[in-house]
Image: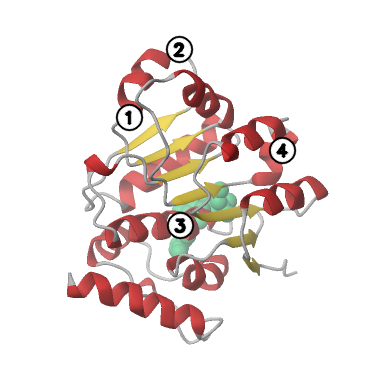
Amino acid sequence: IKKIESLGQRALTLANNGPLDSSVKLFTELPISELTLQGLERAHYAEMTEIQHKSLPYALAKRDVLGAAKTGSGKTLAFLIPILEILYRHQWTQLDGLGALVISPTRELAMQIFEVLCKIGRYHKLSAGLIIGGKQVEEEKAIMGRMNILVCTPGRLLQHMDETAGFDCDNLQVLVLDEADRILDLGFKKTMNAIIENLPRQRQTLLFSATQTKSVKDLARLSLERPEYVGVHEKD
Ligand code: ADP
Ligand code: MG
């Protein structure tokens, strides 16, 4: 317990100190659990990418983050590591229900995120599900209520919120909106608004988007509270 408390304390201190020093490069230098570090090591992740370096100190301190970074910059770990850590610090168990929700624009992307989650989260005792539509509605209904982390596409998530008995988000700690610009481009604005209305207001939200269009800003205003803005600029 002491160890867990000190992770939370160290994360707060780190975030209060502002941006990470550029000499800090490794995941092992962050206040994160042995379980996550072992998962990262096993997946051969050692050095942080720029977006991870810039956003992790805030996300680990449970602050809202609005992250701008293009494809391939490493956004997946920038939100999956905080999810694992926040639930770990809460000593989350299967009985605590849904603790984190990742919303992704497409099935393909959701599947990729889920794969990375399974890899780096392998040493945690958390359940995770992939909810991406298709024919498996009934199978999904049966497992939804037992999952601690869900990776979903917007349409199917809202369908379960409306239809699936025993699925509730009352305990949700972390919401991730990945590729928010693409979610909106695909016409999910209303769906996203309805989903967010179904979620507890007391939560952490991490929103990532390659571009900052007006509709992304609207979604950010609706979903984030006093976010920390982090961006990675293109280099030639
Ligand atoms: P994005 O979501 O920003 O498009 P991804 O999270 O999919 O980027 O990462 C892009 C690629 O970089 C993936 O192949 C991923 O495994 C790799 N990657 C991400 N973070 C790291 C890291 N810290 N060290 C090495 N490779 C990384
Ligand atoms: Mg991505």
Sequence order check, earlier mark of 1 and 3: 3
Which residue, given by chain and number where applicable, does mark 3 sit on? 77
Helix, strand or loop at mark 4? helix
Looking at the rendering, in which quadrant would you find the N terminus?
Answer: bottom left
Helix, strand or loop at mark 2? loop
For image coordinates 62% across by 32% down, the residue present is 194
Q: Please, is residue 124 above or below residue 53 in the view?
A: above
Give left or right: position of 69 versus 54.
right
Disc number at residue 135?
2
> Could you say where residue 176 lies in the image, as x and y percent from the top left?
52, 49
> Could you say where residue 123 lies in the image, as x and y percent from the top left?
21, 53
Residue 166: image quadrant is top left
Which residue, given by chain and number where applicable, does mark 1 sit on? 145
Type of amino acid under label 3? Leu
Of the pair 110 and 194, the residue shown nearer to us: 194
Mark 4 CB near ligand 2 (8 Å cut): no
As measured in the structure, the alpha-carbon distance from the residue carrying label 4 to the one carrying label 1 is: 27 Å
Type of amino acid under label 2? Lys
Which residue, given by chain and number where applicable, does mark 4 sit on? 184
